[in-house]
Image: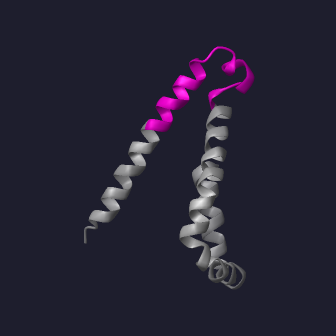
Amino acid sequence: DFAVSALIAASVANLFAAVKANENKKCMDAPGLKDRVGSVGNQFALTTILAFLFSLPLVAVQEGAKLAEFVTLWKTNPIIRFNVIASGLYFYG
């Protein structure tokens, strides 16, 4: 079972990851920024936090109507709670 939409979404995600990497490289080459940020790890953390904050309005528009349903699932289903927390820890931990 092959989903073309999943392939397109993954390709777009890879495209934006490449753009983000190029922009991060340009930022770290700016004079003085490397001293203020400290390391590449700190820069990655800042970029990730900013990307999350910038995506929140889009998420609210696209999925805002389903938030109450998710909160109910979060409170009542321990498997959902575990999977959400574990996926975050595995990805960033």
Residue 25 part of the magenta segment: yes
| For residue 12, side relative to residue 70 (left or right) | left
Image location (x, y in percent) of residue 25: 52, 25
Residue ID at (67%, 81%): 68
Q: Is 74 placed above or below 7 here? A: below
Task: Examine the rendered structure and indicate whether residue 46 appears above or below residue 2.
Answer: above
Residues in magenta, as a range: 19-40
Where residue 41 appears, as percent x and y from the top left, is: 64, 33
The colour scheme of the drawn protein is one colour
| Residue 16 locus on image (x, y percent) | 44, 44
Q: Nearer the viewer, residue 15 or 45?
A: 15
Figure quadrant of residue 10: bottom left
> Seen in the image, is 75 located left or right of residue 66?
right
- Could you tell me which residue is drawn at 53 percent across and 69 percent down? 62
Relative to 27, say whether 15 is above or below. below
Query: Which image quadrant for residue 35?
Result: top right
